[in-house]
Amino acid sequence: MEIALCKWGFLSLLCLGLSFSIGFSVEGLHGNSRVRGVNLGGWLVIEGWIKPSLFDDIPNSDMLDGTEVQLKSVSGNKYVSADNGGGGAVAVDRDVPLAWETFRLWRVSESIFQFRTSGGQFLTCGGDGDNVTAAAELPSDTETFYLERNNNQIHIKLKTGIYLQASNANQLTADYPGTPGWDDNAATFELIIVSNNLHGDYQFANGYGRDKAEEVYKNHRNNFITVEDFNFLYRHGINTVRIPVGWWIAYDPNPPPPFIGGSLQALDNAFSWAQEYNIKCIVDLHAAPGSQNGMEHSSSRDGTTGWPTSSDYISQSLNAIDFLASRYAQHPSLLGIELLNEPSAALVPLDTLTSYYKQGYKIVRKYSSTAYVIFCQRIGNADPSELYQANLGDTNTVIDLHYYNLFDPFFANMSSIDNIQYIYKSRGTQLQSLNGANGPLVFIGEWVNEWNVNGSQTDYQDYGRAQLEVYNAASFGWAYWTLKNDRKHWDFEWNVRNNYLQLQLGCSSCRRSWSYVMFLGLAFGFFFVYGV
């Protein structure tokens, strides 16, 4: 009986070893392996939450592009309101501020701004003595206002120097006589900042102005990610980096304003460092013109999503893919090109996205027959299987899923055990289903060892272990978000150094040696049990 059990035990181990060796593998990676990757987020596409200090020296840094504000007349105690959310009259007559009373800033300089209504129009004033309305679709001089600020109070004036005031008829008019003080007068407004959540490339560059932005960005670019980081990744068994870039990289070194040049040289450096350490690169178009999701990481100016409704923006994105594919297709470190990061399910129609993906696939194939073409799943309420049914390309295609037990009320009150069970049951089941689908490989292109749980180190280790066990089954592999982050549990390096994330990967040569030892051990056990 004991001999029988030993036989079955060794056979199970042998089958397990064989299952790993004959399972999915990714062309271009050594040892028939899959992607074990890390994202280089916050480097060539800026995300202020990753490194908030990048924004520290911007004057009026609480009034960046996209900041939502409300204006309340000090004398009348009423809010400025765009009727129907914009498109017509502006009044100063509301007691309670809602959407019509909320405006998004477009920053021209630290004291010059344009105000966008919830409907998308801009506040406009034709000149001295005129009423302010909200009918302009695009901003120009008549939509540009000059602000004087005293803590949470402001004066607003035209280029001519005339100040706006809340008139006795509850209108916003350009006819205040003289220069107002900071007392209780009709030209003084309380500035209420509702949200200041966008801290991307647009806010960074436009906030500093070109000269200062170039200085700050150069220092960040040269020091945030270096060759030593690739050494660290190699030593810990990471074989791939996913590198987010913005569409403006195609115009480097002189991208359209307000964007800053220099990211192309940094990307070239990354490819060289990757080659030195036998690491592969996935170039990810993280920020598309007009923004594909309204978030800071897509470089949205004010939180709106303009990409899917503009053929020009889509063409610019395809041009960026062409530029990247032509530049890196023959580089030995290129593994793949991701055509777009996290398009919004609510705002990007599926047919628009699949059309773009098909065109992008053909562009990459012009330059490479083997580079993987990666299609990111829409974020929000979307089924990953929708892309498997779209026939996006014939060879070496990948669907990218982003797995976070965050950002959704569903996860808000889960315990540590609930989270871990969700990883095994829901994520694992979905991966098993997608792995078995006849189509692209599966890539968990973003995940993190963070959750809505105030857990111990052991809790984090268990959670990280569960994710690694499940995501290791993805047919293309996974990539952690992100290498470096001021929020420590999002920081891959911190997690590894402090033993919160236990990779058990080791360097690639170590993995090959271990695989060989394991095979010999299994073979020895097999022969020992069967006596052959």
Image (tube, helix red, strand yellow):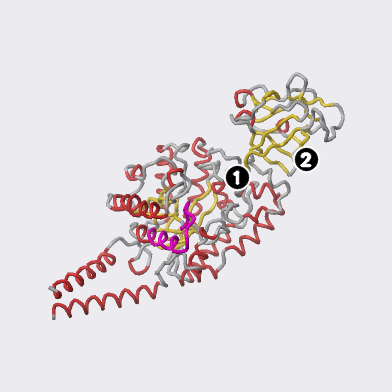
**The quadrant where residue 180 appears:** top right
Against 121, residue 497 (above or below) is: below
Which residue is pictured at 44% across the width and 39% down the height?
Answer: 345
| Residue 497 makes an appearance in the image | yes
**428 left or right, relative to 212:** left
**Which numbered disc flags the more N-terminal residue, 1 or 2?**
2
Which residue is pictured at 43% across the width and 38% down the height?
Answer: 352
Against 402, residue 232 (above or below) is: below
Helix, strand, or loop for circle 2?
A: strand
For the residue pair 299 and 52, the one nearer the viewer reads as: 52
Instruction: Give residue 212's position: percent from left, percent from top.
Output: 71, 54
Which residue is pictured at 47% across the width and 68% down the height?
Answer: 499
**56 left or right, relative to 412:** right
Query: Magenta segment range?
Result: 449-467
Work out which residue is located at the far right of the displayed protein and give it.
178
Which residue is pictured at 29% across the width and 75% down the height?
Answer: 518
Helix, strand, or loop for circle 1?
A: loop
Work out which residue is located at the far top of the displayed protein and give it.
169
The disc label shown at residue 197, or none: 1
Against 494, residue 390 (above or below) is: above
**Residue 206 on the magenta span:** no
Against 2, residue 243 (above or below) is: above
The disc label shown at residue 217, or none: none
Mark 2: which amino acid?
A: Arg
Residue position for label 2 = 149
Gap between marks 1 and 2, in whole Å? Answer: 21 Å
Mark 1: which amino acid?
A: Asn
The quarter of the rendered structure image containing the N terminus is bottom left
**Residue 461 on the magenta span:** yes
Disc 2: CA contacts within 10 A as few (<14), some (14-19) or many (>=20): some
| Residue 330 makes an appearance in the image | no
**370 left or right, relative to 306:** left
